[in-house]
Image: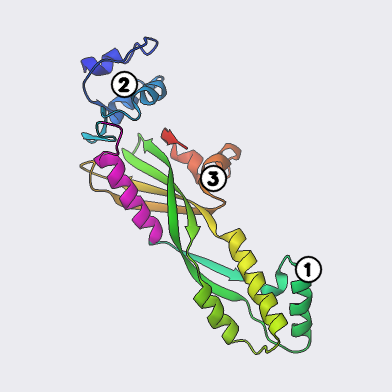
Amino acid sequence: MDTIRSLLFLTEADLPKDGPVSVEDLVKFFPSKHKQAIEKLWGLDRLTYKGKQFFDEGSGFGPVYTGAMEAGKQAAKNETIEFQFDPSQTTNHDHRALIQDAEDSGKDIPSFEVDIKLDDMQEVYLGYQPSSGNLYIGFDAWADTVDDKIDEYLDGLDVDDDNIRDAIDSSIQLALKDFGFFGVLVELKSTDGVRFTANEVIVEPRGFYRGIHNSSAHGSSAFKHLKLIDLRLD
């Protein structure tokens, strides 16, 4: 507790020399100064959660950060995102004209539908929710490739003209490129600060900050209502 009390003097140049400091205590005892305290302790091996360290000595990831990232990534990879696209609605004018001409001539070109998984992820956020005691980890994530599903779709079309097939293929690829960047927020529960389980996963397009975090400023995201304490902002 002496270490906690000493953090009241956050205008001093130096923090106490030793002693662990928990995120839980910082938020509980210093409701107006926890942000400054977290900033000063972030990256040091003294900051803890559930009695375990966020960082090891030398600024490497400790058990809390490592466990949260592993559990968060796995939860995100378990998510399935539905993608549906009508090739005739492509934004490419030339391709749209070719596809619509084919449909006008009696060719059936249905919407392309596929379930997408998230593949590559970059951790960009960590937060703490005082009301639940849980951590929240955020990622920028990119969709896995679905080229094999596109090939299956094209093979099933009654379209022999290579120009039309190429137009459909390019239209789908363009739509997937616009669709394939996501933000992920995972709520993580732990009793020991080492093993984490995911309670909830939120996936939104446009990346974490544009799609989830920053949109809260306009009241358009559930993020605002979580009332998280930001531990790390990218």
Q: Are marks 3 and 2 in contact (CB under 8 Å)?
A: no
Q: Which residue is mark 3?
A: 221
Camera-nearest residue between 14 and 213: 14
Task: Name the spot of residue 150 as percent of width and height, x first.
Answer: 56, 76
Say which quarter of the image contains residue 153: bottom right
Seen in the image, is 53 located left or right of residue 86?
left
Q: Nearer the viewer, mark 1 or mark 2?
A: 1
* Disc 1, SS: helix
Cα separation between marks 1 and 2: 61 Å
> Which range of residues does the magenta coloring cover?
58-77
Within 10 Å of disc 1 (Cα), the crowding (few <14, some 14-19, many 20+) is: few
Q: Which mark is residue 93?
A: 1
The residue under the point 25% across, 45% down is 190
Write the residue at 57% across / 86% down: 155
Instruction: State how many labels appear.
Output: 3
Disc 3 is placed on an element classified as loop
